[in-house]
């Protein structure tokens, strides 16, 4: 069977949400074009912007790197790889591999870790919290730390935007979780037009937000990007609501292809005006580290969860208290 787009090469990939059969070349071109349209639609970045990419070393990282290298001047791209510190996962050799692929694109990768930033690896933080009876999901420590570290480097390098590799599955899940929690502001903040809650936060964009996870996996496979062989040992401790939503959405998507795209597209349309009107929060600053907090809090979320793991003086806070130039 011939490709539905070029009509010349053999079709190898079925795209359920369009009903088309594509050859490898037309599939890659289709994904790149959809990302370009999404970037342009929301003005995610403009020529000359400095972009700071957060790369985990997973397949989506390579896909993001490849697509951005086709869309943007690579001399204006910096990447950061964060080693979480999870036994057997995201090890040094994965990052070395990522670094060498990125070098081929002309992109430098800064390697850092949760330990370097907070003083402890992710696994240490999680076990410390659990041993104190705080049964928090490892992903909470992981997500909050990674966001902070990215923002730290984005500010340090004067980046205009931070760029993450979240795909359509991630975004649709987050949107539905926000809906189920009744978190209106959280839902609006997901919108690509929403500004960050504080001037201390560098705006974050997600160019792959309309690309299915199976598509990023297929893209990575076709391009020969290395696949991460090990799974995070904390994957089953993910917050239950999110895990349920993920399962339910996969089920719905398999019966009605295109559902995830329709969910995100309709939210994008309905909330565009709201997102543009959303003002930055009137924020206070954390009494420990100086980072933004909501006015109701004395300490920021990261300082709070570290404190619950018995870490009262995280490295980043010590640095800011020494009277050195505030890096955060
Ligand atoms: Fe981090 Fe959770 Fe992903 Fe593991 S599963 S890498 S803890 S976000
Ligand atoms: Zn703090």
Image (spheres, rainbow, N blue to C red):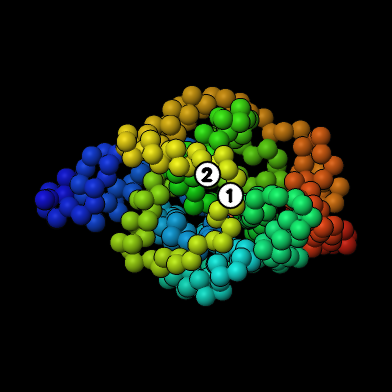
Looking at the picture, tell me which residue is in the foreground, 289 or 328: 289
| Residue that mark 2 sits on | 243
The local crowd at label 2, few if under 14, some if 14 to 19, many if 20 or more residues have their Cα within 10 Å, is: some
- Locate residue 229 relative to residue 302 in the image: left or right: left
Residue 190 appears at what percent x and percent y? 56, 37
Distance from the alpha carbon under mark 1 to that under mark 2: 7 Å
Q: Is residue 140 above or below residue 276?
A: below
Q: Is mark 2 within 8 Å of ligand 1?
A: no
For residue 294, which quarter of the picture?
Answer: top right
Residue 186 appears at what percent x and percent y? 61, 34
| Residue that mark 1 sits on | 238
Residue 201 appears at what percent x and percent y? 67, 46
Residue 295 appears at what percent x and percent y? 81, 35
How many marks are shown on the rendered structure? 2
The local crowd at label 1, few if under 14, some if 14 to 19, many if 20 or more residues have their Cα within 10 Å, is: some
Looking at the picture, tell me which residue is in the foreground, 325 or 278: 278
Taking the spot 21% from the left edge, 42% from the top edge, the residue there is: 20
Q: Are marks 1 and 2 in contact (CB under 8 Å)?
A: yes
Taking the spot 38% from the left edge, 53% from the top edge, the residue there is: 216
Looking at the picture, tell me which residue is in the foreground, 157 or 13: 13
Disc nearer the start of the sequence (1/2): 1
Taking the spot 49% from the left edge, 48% from the top edge, the residue there is: 166
Q: Is residue 14 above or below residue 156?
A: above
Q: Is mark 1 within 8 Å of ligand 1?
A: yes
Q: Is residue 137 above or below residue 225?
A: above
Q: Secondary structure at mark 2?
A: helix
Q: Answer whether residue 77 is visible to the viewer in this image.
A: yes
Taking the spot 61% from the left edge, 27% from the top edge, the residue there is: 182
Q: Secondary structure at mark 1?
A: loop
Looking at the rendering, in which quadrant would you find the C terminus?
bottom right
- Locate residue 108 relative to residue 26 in the image: left or right: right
Looking at the picture, tell me which residue is in the foreground, 113 or 138: 138
């Amino acid at each position: 069977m011939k490709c539905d787009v070029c009509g010349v090469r053999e079709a190898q990939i079925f795209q359920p949400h369009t009903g088309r059969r594509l050859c490898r070349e037309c599939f890659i071109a289709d994904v790149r074009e959809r990302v370009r349209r999404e970037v342009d639609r929301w003005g995610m970045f403009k020529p000359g912007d400095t972009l700071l990419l957060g790369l985990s070393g997973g397949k989506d990282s390579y896909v993001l790197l490849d697509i951005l290298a086709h869309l943007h001047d690579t001399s204006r791209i910096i990447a950061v790889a964060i080693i979480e510190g999870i036994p057997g996962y995201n090890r040094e050799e994965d990052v070395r591999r990522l670094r060498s692929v990125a070098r081929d694109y002309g992109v430098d990768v800064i390697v850092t870790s949760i330990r370097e930033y907070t003083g402890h690896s992710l696994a240490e933080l999680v076990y410390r919290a659990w041993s104190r009876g705080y049964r928090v999901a490892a992903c909470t420590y992981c997500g909050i730390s990674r966001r902070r570290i990215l923002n730290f480097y984005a500010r340090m390098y004067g980046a205009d935007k931070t760029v993450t590799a979240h795909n359509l599955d991630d975004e649709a899940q987050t949107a539905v979780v926000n809906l189920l929690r009744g978190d209106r502001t959280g839902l609006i903040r997901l919108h690509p037009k929403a500004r960050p809650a504080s001037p201390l936060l560098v705006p974050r964009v997600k160019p792959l937000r309309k690309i299915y996870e199976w598509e990023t996996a297929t893209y990575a496979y076709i391009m020969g990007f290395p696949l991460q062989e090990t799974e995070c040992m904390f994957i089953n401790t993910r917050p239950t609501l999110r895990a349920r939503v993920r399962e339910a959405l996969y089920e719905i998507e398999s019966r009605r292809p295109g559902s995830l795209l329709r969910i995100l597209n309709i939210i994008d349309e309905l909330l565009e005006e709201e997102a543009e009107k959303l003002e930055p929060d009137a924020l206070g600053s954390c009494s420990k580290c100086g980072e933004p907090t909501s006015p109701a809090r004395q300490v920021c979320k990261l300082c709070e969860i570290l404190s619950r793991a018995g870490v009262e003086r995280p490295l980043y806070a010590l640095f800011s208290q020494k009277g050195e130039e505030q890096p955060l």
